[in-house]
Amino acid sequence: MGRTLRFRELESIVGQLANSLLSAGVVPGEFIAVLGRNSPQYAALHFGAAGAGVIPAHVSVRSTPEEVTAVLEQTNARLLFHDEASSVTAQVACDAATADVGRVLLAEGLKEFLEMMQSAPDLPDLSPEDPLCVTYSGGTTGAPKGVLVSHRAGCDMAGVIADSFGLTAQDIVCDDTAVPRSRSPGVVSTGNFVRCDLRAATHLECVGADAAHGAAPRNGGHDGANTVDRSRES
C-alpha cells in the first residue's frame, strides 16, 4: 500500500524544502539536478524548488554517469538529489564533474537536508515567465537536450489536463509516467490546481498555489483550448 500525503502536509514539506535550498546557499535562478524514480519526496522537491525560484534539472534514471555529468556541467548544478537505486550513477557522475557537486539522498538524506536549515529566509517573488524546471530528452537521436519549462507553461499544462478530463478536487489522478518526462510537471501539478479552485480553462487562475508551485498567473488567465492549438501549430 502507498502512503497518503495530505495537502497540508505536502504544503509544509514544500515550504521547508524551499527554505532549506536557500539556506544551503542555492540562489534563485540556479540549478539543482534530480535523478530518481517517482516518489512523494521527488514531487515535494519539484514544488519546493519552484517556491524557492531554484530550477530542477530532471534527469532520466536511464542516463549513464557520463550523461548525468554532462547535465551537471551544462547547468552548473550545486546539488544532485538522487534515490538509492541511482547512488552509484550519482557518485560516478559527481566525481567526474569539474566543480564540486553535493549529493543528497532522497528519503533519509532529504530529512537530514531539511534539518540543516538554520533559518527561514524570505522566498523570492517569482514571475510566471521564470523558469520552473528543465527536462531532458531521451537522447535517442543524439545527446539528451534540455528543455526549459516556465511557471506559466506548467500552469497551462495543469489547467488543460484538469479541464480536458473534467477533474475536480474530489478526483484522484494516477500518473504512471516518469517525472523527468516533459509533460510530467503539468501532470504532477494537476492535483494541486483542482484543489485550488480551478476555473474553466478560458479563465484559468491559480488561486492560493504559491506555497505549492511558486509563481502562478493571477490575472488575464489563459485559454486552455488556444494553448492546445498553439502546441499543434508549433
Image (tube, helix red, strand yellow):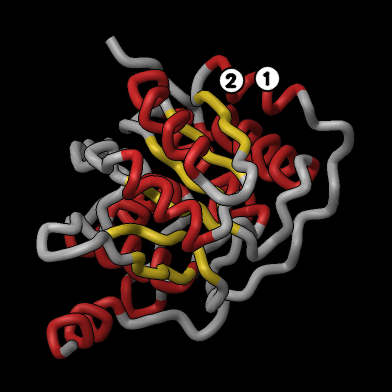
Between 14 and 66, the residue placed more toward the observer is 66
What is the tally of numbered marks visible in this picture? 2
| For residue 200, side relative to residue 138 (left or right) | right
* 65 versus 85 height, above or below: below
Residue 29 position, x and y percent, is 64, 65
Quarter that holds the C terminus: bottom left
Mark 1, secondary structure of its residue: helix
Label 1 – label 2 distance at C-alpha? 5 Å
Q: Tell me which corner region of the image, top left, top right, bottom left or bottom right, holds residue 16.
A: top right
| Amino acid type of the residue tagged 1 in the rendering | Glu
Residue drawn 51% across the image and 38% down it: 94
Q: Is residue 201 above or below residue 76?
A: below
Q: Residue furthest right?
A: 119
Please say whether residue 127 is visible from this viewpoint. Answer: yes
Q: In the image, residue 10 lies at what x, y percent? A: 55, 33
Q: Nearer the viewer, residue 161 or 33?
A: 33
Question: Residue 109 shows which numbered tag?
Answer: 2
- Give the residue at mark 1: 112
Looking at the image, residue 114 sits to the left or right of residue 222; the answer is right
Q: In the image shown, does 183 or 192 lie closer to the viewer?
A: 183
Could you tell me which quadrant the N terminus lies in? Answer: top left
